[in-house]
Amino acid sequence: MFILLLTAACTLSFPQQPPATPIRAGTGTHPSLGFKRGKGVSGILDEDAYQEELEMAKRFPGDETVSTGRATREAELLRQFAEGFQSSQECDGVSFDLKTDLKPQFTLAIVVSGYGKNPDDQTWTWAFSEPRGMGGFGIQSNAKLTARDVCLTLWDNIDPNHFRKPRSKTQ
């Protein structure tokens, strides 16, 4: 159910834009990736913490401290994703913009479920947009694998031959 909502939200929030100048590997132009941002929306949503926040808001209406726990957990998820991005060789050549004033070429949204309730059984659902629309969608079990999948999909959209090695010749 939540995956369906994420897909719909990403499709609606990633408007079609005119095609940008193609990014080609080796030209010195690196693709930039950043989180989809909006009012009250972080780049990573902790589904469990969000549900807890809604319940707490019903019990304690008007209490501004209700969202503190969710913000703390989402900051930890962001740290884990950034570490996964840094350590994944598939992300080499991609710049990841955490600053809100920069407009990345590719925008990303991630929803994590199970982080608080089932840490050994997490689900990281991600979707990113590119200048032409929806760029990729996937599900993984942790931050590092999510970062790897995002970068593989991004490179596949830009240059499908990015990771292919030339075959050696036998003479």
Image (spheres, rainbow, N blue to C red):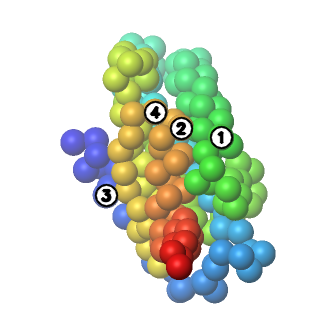
Circles 2 and 4 in contact, beta carbons < 8 Å: yes
Q: Relative to 31, is 161 on the left or the right?
A: left
Q: Quadrant of residue 58?
A: top left
Residue 113 visible in the displayed image: yes
Q: Which residue is mark 2?
A: 144
> Viewer-proximal residue, 158 or 135?
158
Q: Which residue is mark 3?
A: 8
Q: Relative to 120, is 147 on the left or the right?
A: right
Circles 2 and 1 in contact, beta carbons < 8 Å: yes
> Viewer-proximal residue, 77 or 48?
77
Separation (CA) of disc 3 from disc 2: 25 Å
Upstream in the sequence, badge 2 or badge 1?
1
Q: Secondary structure at mark 2?
A: helix
At label 3, the amino acid type is Ala
Separation (CA) of disc 3 from disc 1: 31 Å
At label 1, the amino acid type is Ser
Q: Which residue is mark 1?
A: 87
In front: mark 4 or mark 1? 1
The residue positioned 55% from the left and 72% from the top of the image is 168
Q: Residues within 10 Å of mark 1 (few under 14, many from 20)?
A: some
Separation (CA) of disc 2 from disc 4: 6 Å
Counting from the top left corner in percent of width and height, residue 124 is at: 41, 38
Separation (CA) of disc 4 from disc 1: 13 Å
Upstream in the sequence, badge 3 or badge 4?
3
In front: mark 3 or mark 4? 4
Q: Which mark is residue 142?
A: 4
At label 4, the amino acid type is Asn
Q: Residues within 10 Å of mark 4 (few under 14, many from 20)?
A: many
